[in-house]
Amino acid sequence: MEEEEAGVRRWLVDVAHWRPSPAQFDAVVALLPSHERPAIARFVREDDRKRALVSRLLHYSLVHHVLRIPFRQINICRTPEGKPYLQKNGSALPNFNFNTSHQGDYVGIASEPFCLVGLDIASVSKPQGETASEFISNFSSYLTHHEWNYIVRAGTPSQVLTEFYRYWCLKEAFVKAIGAGVGFGLQRIEFHHEQWTNISIHIDGGVSNKWRFWLFKLDEMHLASIAKGHPEDAVSSYKKTLSNATVAEEQLHSALESPEEAFTLWTVEQLTQLLELME
């Protein structure tokens, strides 16, 4: 932990292995600020409630771990588009930002001190009641012709599905990094790659050198993507939450070119212990 670059974190929790009793679940919920609890309780399915809870646990645990802000002083707000952000923190990392994602067995969080960061986790599950081709055709309007051609030519139905999720995962990570809402036109962005390395993005037809992307295989059924980019690309409501949308070119280059490390695995028990120590 101590060797990590200041503010850079990649944390992952396997929620499939956390099977709390109702009392244990409620005890963890009680650790969070009261205004966070309705967003967890609104879910009907237990798995959805678990993911929502762990997502918020990661918010508070990571902010405290990185910035050493006392628990009761951590003020996490949301933009009109629903993007969580830390209310002006007054720390040495004024652009500190984070992003969470949860799907399937995993909940994750990524943070950066200077550039924007987006994280998306995808569960590569077989569609129910339709073929892989029928399933991906539902999303064809969000993909460019270039992306669509790569997907449909990927090979077997399983390979086609995995290829689709790779593109989708990257698109989601970018949109989440800039703080855009569901109305953002995903067909505006197009990804190019060399066997899923050296991934680049084209925005409205032009290549952008202000962004870097990585794909990870978490296990046989789950993918994750990381997007890192320039703060000036944030949507206006989110840009207002950043202390310094103008980052020095050298500083940005260093942040973008730093290698991506593997995720650090945490358990819910470790996160709750961290929160309890914050009390």
Image (cartoon, rainbow, N blue to C red):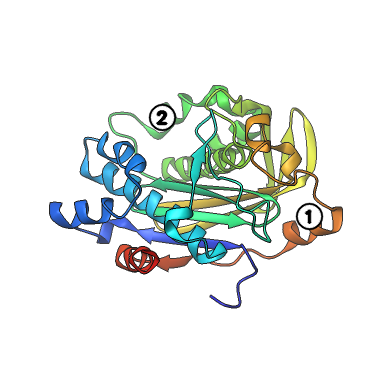
Q: Is residue 21 visible?
A: no
Tell me which residue sits at (54%, 42%) in the image. Answer: 154
Q: Nearer the viewer, residue 279 or 129?
A: 279
Q: Amino acid at mark 2?
A: Phe
The answer for how far apart the CA atoms under marks 1 and 2 are is 39 Å
Tell me which residue sits at (67%, 58%) in the image. Answer: 93
Total labels drawn: 2
Q: Is residue 222 left or right of residue 145?
A: left
Q: Position of residue 85 (x, y in %)?
A: 55, 44
Residue 129, relative to residue 177: is it above or below?
above
Q: Secondary structure at mark 1?
A: helix
Labels 1, 2: front one:
1
Q: Which mark is residue 11?
A: none
Quarter of the image with the C terminus is bottom left
Q: Which mark is residue 252?
A: 1
Q: Position of residue 259 (x, y in %)?
A: 68, 65
Q: Amino acid at mark 1?
A: Leu
Q: Residue furthest right?
A: 249
**Neighbourhood count class around disc 2 (C-alpha, 10 Å): few under 14, some 14–19, many 20 upward:** some
Mark nearer the N terminus (1 vs 2): 2
Answer whether labels 1 and 2 touch (C-beta < 8 Å): no
Q: Is residue 87 left or right of residue 259?
A: left
Residue 6, relative to residue 237: is it above or below?
below
Residue 38, relative to residue 270: is it above or below?
above
Q: Secondary structure at mark 2?
A: helix
Q: Position of residue 92 (x, y in %)?
A: 68, 61
Tell me which residue sits at (39%, 49%) in the image. Answer: 56
Q: Which mark is residue 135?
A: 2
